[in-house]
């Protein structure tokens, strides 16, 4: 139930204040003398705020919390706490109801009760400090101690996926000297690309003879295929992907990953010099276009939001690639 319908709830982007919650039970239901952000050991911290008399807390809040806690059981990457931030119905949102909620859901995290300083019924201190919009309310705090998310709803699956990616990136070894990273890509767009292993230059008329109209539109006229239009997105068999214009091998299946973007995605080109990089200011954006360095065919773009260790996401038109077995 919303406490305040104003759109300015929350303190996203601000340093996380002390929780200010004085009554705590540990994960097994035993009283804790002192608990707060300093005792939460995870790099990230997620605080779930609820009231036992709040239907939405039971309908969506606790189930989302339970899924997230379960996904990070045994991990020190993210730690959780649940706090009953009582601000209305102080009897039905009393201390005993917090105890009952912890027993009911058996989520193995500390639970707090916060009905305000001094006397029961003054209204949650945490809620006022964090400007919660009501309950349920999720607060996510990053390793620097900044609130990076606060809202009634949380997409548990999305949060789990992005936290798992961040956790894996932390564990992954740093890129070695041969790995092209975003810094290297930007340098190539400024300083120019390395010489290609060979060149193939044909006239538009010659390309039209060799290519389908769709291939010509995309590869010779910098077009884009519809997202999710190719089965190649979900193909992860070993092998190489060659330029559909000139046959030069551009990507290896070992660097292919499921970006969910709807286009085949890779983290690295097969050898330096196979792919060329160009600053692309079309459509009001600044992006980096990728082309075949041999025949100048348009392939797609490369973005700095790929997985470790390169951090690159080559977003390539399936039409521009042929799978070859080598
Ligand atoms: Fe080519």
Image (tube, rainbow, N blue to C red):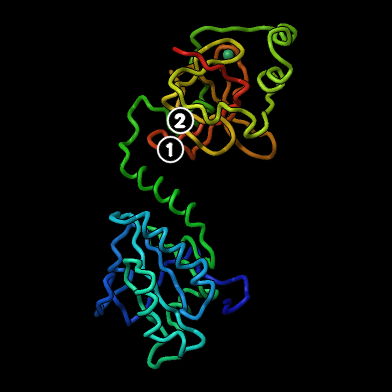
Q: Indicate the secondary structure of the residue bearing disc 2.
A: loop
Residue marked by disc 1:
307
The residue at 59%/71% (across/down) is: 8
Rendered image quadrant of residue 112? bottom left
Q: Relative to 57, is 81 on the left or the right? A: left
Q: Quadrant of residue 28?
A: bottom left
Q: Is residue 203 above or below residue 100?
A: above
Residue lying farthest bottom?
Answer: 119
Query: x and y percent of residue 270 in the render?
Result: 44, 19
Q: CA distance from mark 1 to mark 2?
A: 7 Å
Q: Which corner quadrant holds the C terminus?
A: top left
Task: Establish if 85 lies above or below 41.
Answer: below
Residue 146 visible in this rendered orientation of the protein = no
From the image, which quarter does the N terminus lie in?
A: bottom right
**Image quadrant in which you'd find residue 118:** bottom left
Residue 237 at least partly seen: yes
- The 10 Å Cα crowd at callout 2, few under 14, some 14 to 19, many 20 or more, is many
Is label 1 in a helix, a strand or a loop? Answer: loop
Residue 316 appears at what percent x and percent y?
A: 57, 27
Q: Are marks 1 and 2 in contact (CB under 8 Å)?
A: yes
First in sequence: mark 1 or mark 2?
A: 2
Q: Is residue 126 above or below residue 276?
A: below
292 in relation to 268, above or below: above
Residue at which label 2 appears? 267
């Amino acid at each position: 139930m919303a406490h305040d319908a104003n759109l300015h709830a929350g303190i996203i982007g601000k340093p996380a204040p002390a929780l200010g919650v004085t009554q705590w039970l540990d994960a097994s239901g035993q009283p804790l003398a002192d608990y707060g952000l300093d005792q939460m050991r995870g790099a990230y911290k997620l605080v779930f705020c609820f009231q036992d008399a709040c239907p939405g807390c039971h309908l969506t809040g606790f189930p989302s919390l339970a899924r997230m806690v379960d996904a990070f059981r045994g991990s020190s990457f993210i730690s959780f706490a649940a706090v009953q931030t009582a601000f209305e119905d102080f009897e039905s949102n009393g201390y005993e109801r917090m105890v009952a909620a912890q027993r009911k859901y058996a989520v193995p995290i500390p639970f707090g009760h916060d009905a305000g300083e001094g006397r029961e019924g003054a209204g949650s201190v945490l809620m006022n400090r964090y400007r919660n919009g009501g309950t349920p309310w999720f607060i996510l705090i990053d390793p620097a101690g900044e609130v990076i998310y606060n809202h009634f709803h949380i997409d548990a699956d999305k949060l789990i996926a992005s936290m798992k990616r961040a956790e894996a990136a932390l564990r992954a070894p740093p890129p070695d000297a041969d790995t092209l990273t975003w810094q290297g890509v930007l340098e190539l767009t400024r300083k120019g690309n390395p010489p290609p292993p060979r060149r193939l230059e044909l006239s538009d008329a010659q390309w039209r003879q060799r290519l389908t109209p769709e291939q010509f539109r995309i590869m010779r006229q910098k077009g884009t295929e519809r997202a999710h239009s190719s089965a190649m997105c979900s193909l992860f068999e070993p092998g190489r992907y060659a330029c559909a214009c000139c046959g030069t091998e551009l990507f290896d299946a070992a660097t292919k990953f499921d970006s969910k973007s709807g286009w085949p995605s890779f983290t690295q080109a097969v050898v330096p010099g196979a792919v060329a990089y160009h600053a692309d200011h079309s459509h009001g954006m600044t992006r980096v276009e990728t082309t075949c360095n041999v025949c100048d065919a348009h392939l797609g773009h490369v973005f700095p939001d790929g997985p470790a260790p390169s951090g690159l996401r080559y977003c390539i038109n399936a039409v521009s690639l042929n799978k070859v077995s080598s």
